[in-house]
Amino acid sequence: MPFHRFEGIEKKALSPHLSSGQGAIVEGEYMYFCRVSKVAGTGSQIHYHPNELMIFPVSGKINALVGQDRRVVTPGTFVHVPAYAQHQMIATEDGDMEYLYVKDRSWTVVGLDRDQVVPDKAPSVDEINEMYEDGSTESFEKDAAKAQIIVEGLNNSYYPILPSLDAPASSGRHTVWIEGERLAFGYGEIPEGFSGETTENAHEQFIYVLKGVIDAQVDDERQESGPGSIIHIPKGSKQSLSTQSGQHARYASVRAMPKLEEMLREKAAAAAAGN
């Protein structure tokens, strides 16, 4: 099933011991594609995790920290959180916020406290919620000397792409890609009446429609995807993105990088050998 909406997916606390964030998750083969919401004035503690994280706000403002760089981020700016990087996302007092939140599957979506030692096994969302409810998250090993959090030496992680999601439309087909180690974040615009070619995706990709309607086809399935729609394109699938007359569209996207595919192949092979 290549087409989804977050509204039809149960929201859960992703790291209740660290954050107020509630999120709905679409699980891909190589990544978790989520939308997280936080109430005004609430957010996360400073924390880290072994996987890479891509963040793109869709409403409200984020008081964001990556490494030692703190900024207030609004819709239209992409935030890149490298694996193991110290970070924190808080909804400003202005109002509630929502943001796209995408992590690679080398770890789960569950975060680690800044002084927590990386456990041998990543807890699932259900497991961390059970642990939080019974108070056993306090049993995690804490040792700042052994924690793998990265605080210093990170380069700029903030990428302004457009001034707001209501910015004037581009005159032509427009795409921007920012490549991390394991994931790449993309922003795109499709002018009205555009007929996209059918191509085969070399890597898994998720698309989130921000504005307008995209006539999307993935293999043999087709849908007119409006704002809030999710288009999942598995690795090796054929896809096309088009628009009808009068329907300019803009979207955010994340795709898997070859490095991630290699990492997960090696991880699966090691697990199989261990059995």
Image (cartoon, helix red, strand yellow):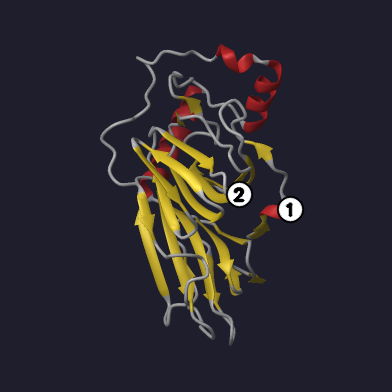
Q: Nearer the viewer, mark 1 or mark 2?
A: 2
Give the residue at x 56% y 65%. 210
Label 1 CA crowd tier, 10 Å (few <14, some 14–19, many 20+): few
Give the residue at x 50% y 47%. 62
**Quadrant of the image containing the N terminus:** bottom right
Give the Cα separation between the discs numbered 1 and 2: 24 Å
Q: Write down the quadrant of residue 81 in the picture.
A: top left
Any part of residue 164 in sight: yes
Vertical order, 262 against 148 (above or below): below
Give the residue at x 44% y 63%. 187
Left or right? Give the position of 58 relative to 174. Answer: right
- Of residue 92 and residue 144, the one placed in the foreground of this image is 92
Position in image of residue 249 (x %, y %): 54, 74
Vertical order, 21 against 217 (above or below): above
Which residue in the protein does label 2 denote?
95
Any part of residue 202 in sight: no
Q: Amino acid at mark 2?
A: Gly
Q: Residue furthest front?
A: 94
- SS class, disc 1: helix
Q: Amino acid at mark 1?
A: Gly
